[in-house]
Image (cartoon, helix red, strand yellow):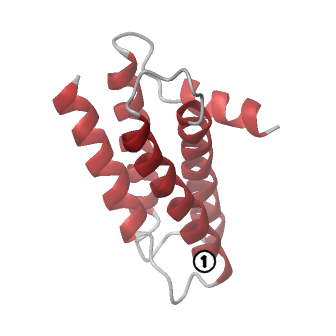
Amino acid sequence: MYNQSAARAYQETGYQGGEPREREAALLIKAAANLQRTKSEEATREELDHALTFNRHVWTLFVGELLDENHEMPKDLRQNLVNLGLFTFNHTLDVMADPQNKTVDSLININRNIAEGLRANG
């Protein structure tokens, strides 16, 4: 089920062409934009849950790929990104459990920074 959801999230970027890094960057930017919209006063709990779930699916896809020993990225860099993914998973649970006292700012910043790095190194 996770793999299907993550794959669907990857396809939902609406970006069909280009290099894989650009598609990944677009996916992270989309997830960050979804999270950013939840910060408005009009945002509902359902919208927050949807944005958090979408972001979690994105990171599930990334972490799954990064755990592949045949991935071309250096192992130490892969491990750092997996650690960011684990932070993302844990922080997502924290926000879902206590949305009044937890923010999505760190998730937005992580996504934007990783997307920027992907685009700069693409």
Report the residue at 45% width, 13% height from top.
Answer: 16
Q: Quadrant of residue 114?
A: top left
Towards the viewer: 7 or 82: 82
**As drawn, 84 above or below 118:** below
Q: Residue furthest bottom?
A: 101
Around disc 1, counting alpha carbons within 10 Å, would you say few (fewer than 14), some (14 to 19), or many (20 or more)?
some
Give left or right: position of 52 versus 32.
Answer: right
The residue that appears at 32% across and 24% down in the rendered structure is: 22
* Element at label 1: helix
Residue named by callout 1: 94
Residue 62: x and y, percent?
Answer: 53, 37
Residue 103, placed above or below residue 29: below
Q: Considering the image in quadrants, where does the N terminus appear?
A: top right
Place of residue 118 in the rendered image (x, y in percent of width and height, measured from the top left):
28, 33
Q: Residue at x 47, y 72 (%)?
A: 42
Q: Disc count in the image?
A: 1
Question: What residue occupies the far left of the structure in this picture?
Answer: 120
Give the percent coordinates (x, y) of residue 109: 31, 60
Percent of width and height locating residue 78: 44, 40
The image shows residue 56, relative to residue 3, as above or below, that is below
In which quadrant will I find the C terminus? Answer: top left
Toward the right, the furthest residue is 1
Q: Identify which amino acid the numbered label 1 is placed on.
A: Asp
The residue positioned 37% from the left and 70% from the top of the image is 105
- Give whichever of 63, 69 is nearer the camera: 69
